[in-house]
Amino acid sequence: MIRTVIAVLLVSLLIVVAISLNGDPGVASLTWLGWRVDSTAAAAVLLIGFSALLASVFWRVLAWLVEAPRRAAQAAAATRRRQGAEALTRGFLAAAAGDGPEARRFAQRAADLSDETPQLVRILAAQAAESAGDATAAHAAYSAMLGFPEMRLAAHRGLMQTALRNGDEAAALRHAQDAYELAHTAPWAWRALLAARLEAAEWAQALTLVGGALERKIVSPLIAERARAALQTVSAAALGSGQQAVDLAQTAARARPDFTPATVICARLLTADGRGARAIPLIEAAWKARPHPALWLAWRDLRTDEAPKERAARLMSLAALNPDGLESRILRAEAALIAGESPPANLGLENEMVTQRLAGLMARIANSHGATDEARAWIARGAGAPVEPDWSDIDTAGQAFSYSAADWARVVTTYAETGELIHPRHERAAPVLTDLPRIPAAYEGSAAFISAAESGGVLPPIVDDGDFGDALRPTPSVAQTSGGWGFLAQGGRKGR
């Protein structure tokens, strides 16, 4: 409007200036209803300009008055939208903070104000009910969302979580299945289905789910590969024998040499089938990737008809594949003891954290060097030492990875997500294979000796009524299963 007025004034001024510079003021006459008006041309131009200006102003004022109701409605709608957006924002914040009553109050206010965003209002109502602990209202809110195609995925997730909180696992699984079929990129639905399959020990169905997740790009190829290897391994363990079990374990061991259970179970199946030589490259690859005591026990069991020196040489060849690892140094010591030799002094085992297995090994090494008192000290230190996580994977019968279905489910999940091998038996302090000689009764009451041995102090004099052979005699359980305290060396089988 202002620019229009300025433009009219400037045009009129230019016309007047042009007429004035011409030197002829001109004549303008107007006759209307018997009236005659005479003026100069410049005056006529100015009069016309001002008349047009007044007409324009009058028209704009009239239009403004006519549009006033519409403008008022638009302003009211804008205020309503602003208040509705504020109510939604504060409602979601209250729900996230766990303030149920406040969230429900803002949800009701948003329902009254937000006509343009009904989806957000429904989601806020459901979350507000959850925050307030009203399971019935939350279920009703999510159920109402199922009637809107664009909200079904969110509705199924909310109903699944509500069912889980109510302990209705069957309903939760149904909603997860519906969501998985509805959306190809719903990782939460896939994870819920996978967890249910693992809990039910349905390994084949879990494998199918992993394949589908890879196709839908729900998980990365690395996670899918690790999950497949772990599931193939547990499937082979569940079968227990047969070519299908061998094929599953072999595929897993080749795909993921760092997943020790795959290689150990595959070696066990091949050895039982008389094809132990086929496990040699698998164990070697696994030892290079991640040395584990179960691997060299499986390597030891590949042959049962060899002399001690032959067995020691074969164990040394495995240790040489990863010479600097702790398990390789332990294996070199075991091999030397099997061969009837004293282990080399440069293994550095005495600098490692003391465990029951290591203490038993050090006691045998000390005895091989004729250091009787040192052997007794290691026995005393090992009595209260912890069990190694890797060693806990072997049960008292010498069977590695003899897990329950629940244990396997946790192993599969953790390995798939992190690539780490957990130890369920270690977590629950399950009994393990022991290589620690029994302390003779003559020394069980010698607190001073044990205290000095554990602290590394000077050992007090010991009055020994028995011979050292009694001190190194194994516990009855180990003796019964192995025929002597060198279970790890002898393998627990006749003819070895």
Image (cartoon, rainbow, N blue to C red):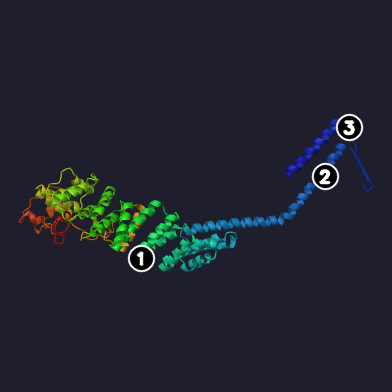
Three-letter code for the amino acid on which mark 1 is drawn: Ala
Q: Nearer the viewer, residue 448 or 267?
A: 267
Residue placed at 35% from the left, 62% from the top? 203
The picture places residue 380, in percent across and down from the top left corner, at 15, 53
- At a point 17% along the width and 42% down the height, the residue shown is 346
- Residue 137 vs residue 493: left or right? right
Q: Check whether the beta carbons of the residues at disc 2 and disc 1 lie within 8 A of each other.
A: no
Which residue is identified by label 2?
Answer: 51
Q: Which residue is mark 1?
A: 200
Dot 2 falls on a residue whose secondary structure is: helix
Kindly identify the amino acid type of the residue bearing the numbered disc 2: Ser
* Image quadrant where one finds the C terminus: bottom left
Question: What type is the residue that disc 3 sits on?
Answer: Asp
Q: Which residue is mark 3?
A: 24
Q: Nearer the viewer, residue 93 or 305?
A: 305
Residue 475 x/y as whole percent: 14, 60
Decide if residue 174 is in sight here: yes
Residue at position x 85%, y 34% in the image = 19
